[in-house]
């Protein structure tokens, strides 16, 4: 495990990359140069996604040639998450691509750094509002340099939750069942459109609960930020034995600590897990 000073340097580096990539992403949209395409027929991808991915992964490779990289656009090989020997960077160049393409502000660059499958540093930078969430393991979490903390919500009925839905529409029924249960038992729903920001918003108390099934690049950095802000992070489903929990994206639940167990019960019973 790296010493705290090294981890601070790594977090600084991740922040610098996230902010520079965020500038690139913002510039591309402000200059109306947005070019969109589709991957796997349904999933929107813009030229800026690819440019930001190349910028971030190129800079990591140059500084840490021995490290592995898992990035959504250029290196999406999920088996990387299970190889624990060398440090791993986990990158989402634009989380919230649909928002980006529609001119919405909820867009983030997400960069995480893990050793032995455990995330040690995370940065989520939202270039449009100019907000940078950051955490180094054991050192707390900040938003633009100020310490942040979860909302302290105590009951689901007075909790605001966020979730999301996949691009593929072939298995939506279980998600609709969960949503049905949650909307009846919580205050209300927000569909922000960026998993990384959903989780950072739980970290700073703008939301109380987040759950979804997503990929490691969507949540790895934000999950550490939430944990360091005192939120509880785990899963309402099972994590396969031996798989690094920090990188398992199925059935994620992150919330203010007091509502975590009650919400887990709601989601498990709506999923037919119990
Ligand atoms: C998406 C966002 C969204 C979530 C989707 C993700 P992308 O990431 O995080 O909130 O619901 O499942 O794929 O495609 O914008 O990077
Ligand atoms: Ca994403
Ligand atoms: Ca993305």
Image: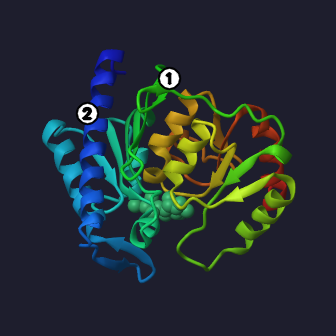
Residue 117 in view of the camera: yes
Q: Nearer the viewer, residue 236 or 204?
A: 204
Q: Position of residue 174 (x, y in %)?
A: 73, 68
Q: Is residue 33 left or right of residue 113?
A: left
Q: With respect to residue 111, does 35 lie above or below?
A: below
Q: Nearer the viewer, residue 86 or 192?
A: 192
Q: Position of residue 179 (x, y in %)?
A: 76, 63
Q: Is residue 130 left or right of residue 264?
A: left
Q: Is residue 154 left or right of residue 118?
A: right
| 2 or 1: tag closer to the N-terminus | 2
Q: Secondary structure at mark 1?
A: loop
Q: Secondary structure at mark 2?
A: helix
Which numbered marker is on residue 55?
none
Residue at 56%, 45% in the rendered image: 199
Mark 1, Cα crowd under 10 Å, few <14 / some 14-19 / many 20+, is some
Q: Position of residue 138 (x, y in %)?
A: 48, 20
Q: Quadrant of residue 76?
A: bottom left
Q: With respect to residue 246, does 251 lie above or below?
A: below
Q: Is residue 151 left or right of residue 11?
A: right
Mark 2, Cα crowd under 10 Å, few <14 / some 14-19 / many 20+, is some
Which numbered marker is on residue 140?
1
Q: Is mark 1 within 8 Å of ligand 1?
A: no
- The residue tagged 2 is 13
Q: Nearer the viewer, residue 17 or 26?
A: 26
Q: Position of residue 219 (x, y in %)?
A: 50, 48
Residue at 42%, 83% in the rendered image: 41
């Amino acid at each position: 495990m790296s010493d705290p000073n090294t981890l601070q340097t790594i977090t600084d580096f991740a922040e610098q990359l996230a902010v520079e990539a965020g500038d690139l992403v913002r510039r591309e949209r402000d200059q109306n140069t947005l070019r969109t395409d589709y991957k796997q027929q349904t999933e929107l991808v813009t030229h800026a996604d690819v440019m930001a991915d190349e910028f971030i992964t190129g800079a990591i490779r140059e500084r840490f040639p021995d490290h592995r990289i898992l990035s959504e656009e250029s290196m999406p090989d999920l088996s990387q998450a299970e190889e624990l020997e060398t440090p791993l960077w986990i990158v989402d160049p634009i989380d919230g691509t649909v928002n980006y393409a529609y001119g919405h502000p909820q867009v983030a660059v997400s960069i995480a750094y893990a050793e032995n499958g455990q995330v040690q540093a995370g940065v989520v930078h939202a270039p449009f509002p100019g907000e940078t969430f950051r955490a180094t393991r054991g050192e707390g979490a900040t938003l633009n340099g100020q310490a942040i903390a979860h909302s302290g919500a105590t009951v689901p009925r007075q909790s605001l939750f966020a979730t999301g839905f996949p691009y593929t529409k072939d298995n939506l029924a279980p998600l609709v069942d969960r949503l049905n249960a949650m909307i009846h038992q919580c205050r209300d729903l927000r569909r922000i459109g960026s998993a990384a920001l959903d989780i950072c918003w739980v970290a700073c108390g703008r939301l109380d609960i987040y759950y979804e099934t997503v990929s490691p690049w969507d949540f790895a950095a934000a999950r550490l930020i939430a944990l360091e802000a005192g939120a509880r992070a785990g899963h309402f489903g099972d994590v396969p034995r031996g798989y690094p929990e920090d990188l398992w994206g199925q059935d994620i639940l992150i919330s203010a600590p007091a509502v975590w167990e009650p919400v887990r019960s709601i989601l498990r019973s709506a999923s037919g897990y119990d």
